[in-house]
Image (cartoon, rainbow, N blue to C red):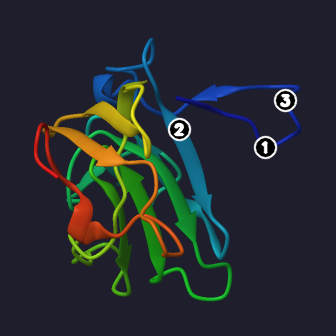
């Protein structure tokens, strides 16, 4: 990791920690705490946090794995939302604990296929989870409910 404090005129190497780039070809994201520029997050297979500007790193345990996105509340850095292969979760205590992902119908899908029925069914493989089959809509409703979501082949 390299850091510049003069708008990129000069760069200084601050870390050679291999975890920062272990999935660089696949995905990697970096976020700076909006209230403390010395606190930096790198999201990859592990979620990492540095409180010294990137010199040392600690693992932030999340709800699932393969972390992709992070929102840090600009007014309270203890409040964060992290998105990963299992969905999204909320922390109110600086990432010490995270909300469950079982309370919202979110998933990362690899491929989606549909059949020719009506309502047509959506078939998909979930990242690091099971496959699913679900009707694209429910008659006389406002959308797809979690009650209709099931493992592949079930309705």
Q: Percent position (x, y) of residue 102?
A: 20, 70
Q: Which residue is mark 3?
A: 8
Determine the residue positioned at 37% across, 41% down.
Answer: 108
Judging depth in this view, the residue of 147 and 36 nearest the camera is 147
Residue drawn at (42%, 17%) of the image: 26
Residue corresponding to mark 2 = 29
Label whose residue precedes the other's in the sequence (2 or 1): 1
Q: Could you tell me how far apart the alpha carbons at marks 2 and 1 are, in whole angstroms?
A: 20 Å
Can residue 101 be seen here? The reply is: no
Residue denoted by label 1 = 5
Query: Do labels 3 and 2 touch, CB within 8 Å?
Result: no
Q: Secondary structure at mark 2?
A: strand
Earlier sequence position, callout 3 versus callout 2: 3
Mark nearer the viewer, 3 or 2: 2
12 to the left or right of 83:
right
Horizontal side of residue 111 vs 147, given as left or right? right
Q: Residue at x 38, y 87 (%)?
A: 92
Within 10 Å of the Cα at label 2, are there few (<14), some (14-19), or many (20+) other Cα atoms? some
- Say which element carries label 1: loop
Q: What separation in Å lies between label 3 and label 1 (alpha carbons)?
A: 7 Å
């Amino acid at each position: 990791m390299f850091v510049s404090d003069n708008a990129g005129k000069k760069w200084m190497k601050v870390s050679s920690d291999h975890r920062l780039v272990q999935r660089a070809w696949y995905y990697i994201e970096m976020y700076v705490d909006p209230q403390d520029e010395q606190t930096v997050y790198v999201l990859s297979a592990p979620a990492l946090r540095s409180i010294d500007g990137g010199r040392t790193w600690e693992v932030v345990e999340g709800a699932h794995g393969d972390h992709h996105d992070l929102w840090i509340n600009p007014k309270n850095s203890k409040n964060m939302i992290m998105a990963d292969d299992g969905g999204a979760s909320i922390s109110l205590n600086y990432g010490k604990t995270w909300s469950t992902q079982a309370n919202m119908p979110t998933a990362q899908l690899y491929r989606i296929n549909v059949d020719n029925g009506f309502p047509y069914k959506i078939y998909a493989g979930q990242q690091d989870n099971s496959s699913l089959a679900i009707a694209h809509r429910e008659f006389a409703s406002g959308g797809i409910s979690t009650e209709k979501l099931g493992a592949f082949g079930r309705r």
